[in-house]
Amino acid sequence: MSRAWNFSAGPAAMPEDVLKRAQQELLEWDGARASVMEVSHRGKAFMEMAARVEADLRELLGIPSNYKVLFLQGGATQHFAQVPMNIAADGQRADYIVNGHWGEKAASEAALYASAYVAATSKDDGYRSIPDRAGWDLDPEAAYVHITTNETIHGVEMHDIPDTGGVPLVADMSSDILSHPLDVSKFGLIYAGAQKNIGPSGLVVMIVREDLLQRHPRPLPRIFRYAEYAAADSMLNTPNTWGWYLAGLTFQWLKGQGGLAAMERRNRIKEESLYAAIDGSGGYYRNEVDPSARSRMNVVFNLHDAALEPVFVAEATEAGLLALKGHRALGGIRASIYNAVPIEGVRALCDFMAEFRRTHG
Ligand SMILES: *Cc1c(COP(=O)(O)O)cnc(C)c1O
């Protein structure tokens, strides 16, 4: 048996070069005579590594100096709750644009701490589009506007970052961060669980504008306060050292690949060939997402006959194409083609799709 093409939605494929490097250094890391998991996070070697990881991320995304970068835990889900705790006052409006499952969850968690308001939703069309910007019912006094730039389950992506004027834009970018260049200055706060496009689960990367850290809407235990993490260089308590290290290897890998503009070009080739395989199948495969909102990272589709879908997944697995079963909430097929999935992997999937159609047509 050998490694297969992995289309898992998350935890997802990691770059093979990153895994190999981690394997090489697993027993003895950076002259420490121990693994990176076995040394103090307050030791010189780890502290230097942590600073390098942040510097690499800043370089990749061009993060302006008035933003802090935090390395947190709890998954994106914890931050659905922790963001409003930190930056919205009781009863203050927090506006949510909901175009899928994760935005829905984020809005419902926020309701405990703010007047969470769904300012626009595409629920009525089954989350197959992004609500038209002209119809967003935003409050100029809101604490923030929350968006989910890529809805991992529904395969819907926001390709234009909206201008929300003086109201800070907060984005869950768990499944598309680092897949293309980004103008960070358009955001107040960006957060992302690592297990899609960064590294292993258990790590959350947050990029937050300093003025938002000045907000103190309520007393909170220190462990829940972003400002405390910022003041302590994300080492308020023991961080996820292994996740932080692997994120660093991924950032170096991205730089070696030519940075985010190069990743965007590669991702475009992958996405275009996969959607072409679907659209060119004469209805054998179907993607129902509004073409202007199709995800570049999670390509969802159905077969013309739903009874063939489990057969497709089983035969794909046998052919070395893993984790193509759609999310349990939606069914169908989903191919997640994050940064770490190479073009050859997507070609192999397209070839398989053509062959499947030929043999099961
Ligand atoms: C996976 C995912 C989440 C949930 O992440 P957890 O780390 O499991 O909490 C939230 N938002 C988006 C967009 C995701 O893709």
Image: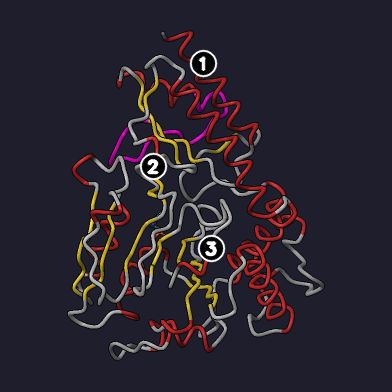
Regarding residue 190, the answer to whether it shows in the image is yes
Q: Which residues are magenta?
A: 316-332
Regarding residue 100, the answer to whether it shows in the image is no
Residue 258 at x, y percent in the picture: 72, 52
Colour mapping: secondary structure
Q: CA distance from mark 3 to mark 2?
A: 19 Å
| Identity of the residue drawn at 37% across and 24% down | 286
Label whose residue precedes the other's in the sequence (1 or 3) = 3
| Identity of the residue drawn at 57% across and 20% down | 351
Residue 179 at x, y percent in the picture: 56, 51
Seen in the picture, residue 222 relative to 330 is either above or below; the reply is: below
At mark 2, the secondary structure is: helix
| Identity of the residue drawn at 66% across and 75% down | 50
At mark 1, the secondary structure is: helix
Residue at label 1? Answer: 354
Residue at label 3? Answer: 183
Left or right of residue 343, residue 220 in this image: left
Image quarter of residue 103: bottom left
**Amino acid type shown at disc 1:** Ala
Seen in the picture, residue 284 relative to 258 is either above or below; the reply is: above
Residue at label 2? Answer: 293
Seen in the picture, residue 119 relative to 11 is either above or below; the reply is: below
10 Å neighbourhood of mark 2: few (<14), some, or many (≥20)? some
Is 329 inside the magenta-drawn segment? yes
Q: Main secondary structure of the magenta part?
A: loop
Q: Classify the position of the C terminus by image quarter.
A: top left
